[in-house]
Image (spheres, grey):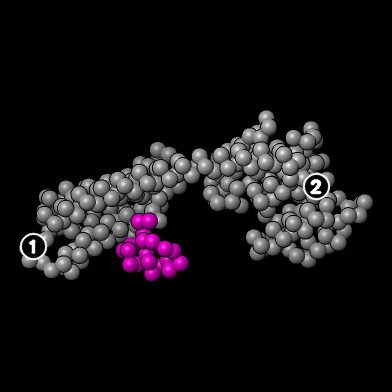
Amino acid sequence: MAGKVQKDFIHAKGVSIGIYTEDFQNEYLSLTDIARYKSDDPAAVIQNWMRGRDVLEFLGLWESLHNPQFKPLEFEEFRNQAGANAFTMSPKKWIDGTNAIGIVSKSGRYGGTFAHSDIAFEFASWISAEFKLYIIKDYKRLKYDESSRLSLSWNLNREVAKLNYRIHTDAIKDNLLPPALTPIQIACTYASEADMLNVALFGMTAKQWTESHPDLSGNIRDHATLQQLLVLANMESYNAILIGQNLAQPERMKLLRELAVQQLNTLEKMNGDILPKLTK
């Protein structure tokens, strides 16, 4: 697993449980923290849980559904051994033996054994049904908070972009459109200006984006980042000013691209997020 790590904690019956994601989709909960609810020796608790045949079958099924690199033959060998008195299993043995990704070991201050939320909830059920419900309750609270913040920020920037788009189109109507144009000609002029902004910010026109992403619904701006939407709003306002100054489109294109580069780089320095970098 690679990428930028986002860490957080959820809380259940006085126990803090570490949670992290590296792709902002799959989240991993600390089995080590969950196991501490039952014992001061969490490693032993996890290993004891993993000895069970039913548990191994669940882990194997999860890997089969989510991990193309999973080793089924090695898994079958483990499953055949499960249940014997001499059989032992640990996270390291499982990961090394089957190339598993659902359970991972992390080092450092907040290290330990982590598992995908699907697996972590199964482990919590084995620890205590009551404890699992407390974990799920706070996990849902965390997801709700994240969703609320994201929705508010995204919609705010989207509405700002819409308002600036109105200013932008009014400037086109007042300064670029000669009289007696047909509705089709007017629409084409709007599309040209919108695509100029798309190319300046995204590097492609709306049509090019649609052709490159046939599986995605919506348009190029619906899939923009919060930072890109904010910059787009500023570009629309700036373009309205440039149109009022009677600057030709090629000159405006250059100035708008410079603005996009400057503002995206500034936003990247401010919040540390990885943004698409535009080269001048």
Disc 2 crowd rating (10 Å Cα; few below 14, some 14-19, many 20+) is: some
- Residue displayed at 58% across by 46% down: 21
- Left or right placement of residue 86 versus residue 236 in this view: right
Decide whether residue 225 is among the magenta residues: no
Q: Amino acid at mark 1?
A: Pro
- Left or right placement of residue 155 versus residue 179 in this view: right
Number of numbered discs present? 2
Residue underneath mark 2: 49
- Residue displayed at 46% across by 42% down: 148
Q: Which element type, helix, strand or loop, lies under badge 1?
A: loop
Foreground residue among 142 and 71: 142
Q: Does the CB distance between marks 1 and 2 fall below 8 Å?
A: no
Residue underneath mark 1: 178
Residue 3 in sight in this render: no
Q: Answer above or below: position of 50 versus 272.
A: below
- Residue displayed at 45% across by 41% down: 149
- Left or right placement of residue 208 versus residue 28 in this view: left
Q: Quadrant of residue 177?
A: bottom left
Q: Position of residue 28 (x, y in %)?
A: 63, 46
Magenta-highlighted residues: 204-222
Decide whether residue 219 is among the magenta residues: yes
Give the main secondary structure, helix, strand or loop, of the magenta stretch: loop
Q: Quadrant of residue 65?
A: bottom right
Q: Amino acid at mark 2?
A: Trp
Q: Position of residue 186 (x, y in %)?
A: 16, 64
The outermost residue toward the top is 14
